[in-house]
Image (cartoon, helix red, strand yellow):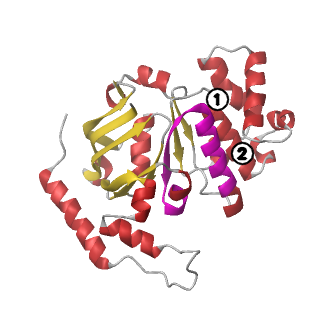
Amino acid sequence: MSVLSIRDLSAVSDRDGGAPILRGVSLDLAAGEVLGLVGESGAGKSTIAKAVLGMLPRAVRITGGSALFTGRDLLRLSPNDLRQITGSEITLIPQDPMTALNPGRRIESQLTHGLRLKRGMSATAARERGLALLEEVRIREPERVMRSFPHELSGGMRQRVLIAAAFAMDPKLVVADEPTTALDVTVQKQILRLIRAMQAKHGTSVIFVTHDLGVVAQICDRVTLLYGGMVVEAGATAEIMARPQHPYMQALLAAGPRYDRPDRALAPVPESVFEGLRAELAAFDRRGPRHV
């Protein structure tokens, strides 16, 4: 059963004269599954995530499609109904923990706020839950961390706090928006393992937004490759990594480093691949989105 089912989602930027941002995107996310949205900057992956979270900027306008979350169309809910879902049933692990956390509030206040507001927990119960969550994300000295301000923690610890906050409400869906971009490689690997462990323990579905196919290979059950707001290729991660069908995916995999072949030269994506992609985008634009 799908936790999230997106069909023919299209969007334009009114700021850019109605330029397409999403072109007929369709995808499904099953319960307990990790789906990677991958593509270069501007491919549309973060726009899809923001549409699910109800965080699209005013200049972005949905022109067609649906996003069914446990049977409810997120695109047609009232703002109040959407607020009831986001932050509890759907949560976010943002990209930059330093800007996501309020620098003027202690970690305890930020970690327990949602539990008290949306779960009605007492201050004592919320604090106990917060301490348990910090232990769950393998933070040492959780009591000290609860008393700390964000600037007193390392980048990796701040990201662990945000992961704890995302799973605090036992959501059905977590959107991870490039949560390892600001971290060094060693910490990145730890955070990826942690997200996967938390996801498996809680049985949560995850949308993982990234530009890194290596990250997709490590953490995602399935992958959707985007270009210009259009789905280029989608399927099981292992299958696509072993036997990519679209020339763009083939070229991206060929362009990446191979640790088992350190002497192999990196191959840039051929211009002919981009010409083919531009032709696909033009064909979609001539056909037009399916309007609701």
- Closest to the observer, 93 or 55: 93
Q: Residue at x 48, y 59 (%)?
A: 211
User: Depth-wise, is mark 2 or mark 1 nearer the camera?
Assistant: 1
Inspect this view and state whether residue 102 appears.
no
Q: Main secondary structure of the magenta part?
A: helix
Q: Amino acid at mark 2?
A: Arg
Please determine whether, in this image, residue 119 is positioned above or below residue 180: above
Magenta span contains residue 206: yes
Q: How many marks?
A: 2
Tell me which segment is drawn in magenta.
Answer: 189-216
Q: Horizontally, is 279 left or right of 72 in the view?
A: left
Q: Position of residue 151 (x, y in %)?
A: 77, 47
- Closest to the observer, 86 or 100: 86
Number of the label disc, if any, that sits on residue 168: 1
Q: Amino acid at mark 1?
A: Ala
Q: Earlier in the sequence, mark 2 or mark 1?
A: 2
Q: Position of residue 255 (x, y in %)?
A: 45, 75
Q: Horizontally, is 106 left or right of 252 in the view?
A: right
Q: Name the residue that disc number 2 marks.
A: 158
Q: Horizontally, is 167 left or right of 174 in the view?
A: right
Q: Horizontally, is 160 left or right of 21 in the view?
A: right
Number of the label disc, if any, that sits on residue 157: none
Q: Quadrant of residue 188?
A: bottom right
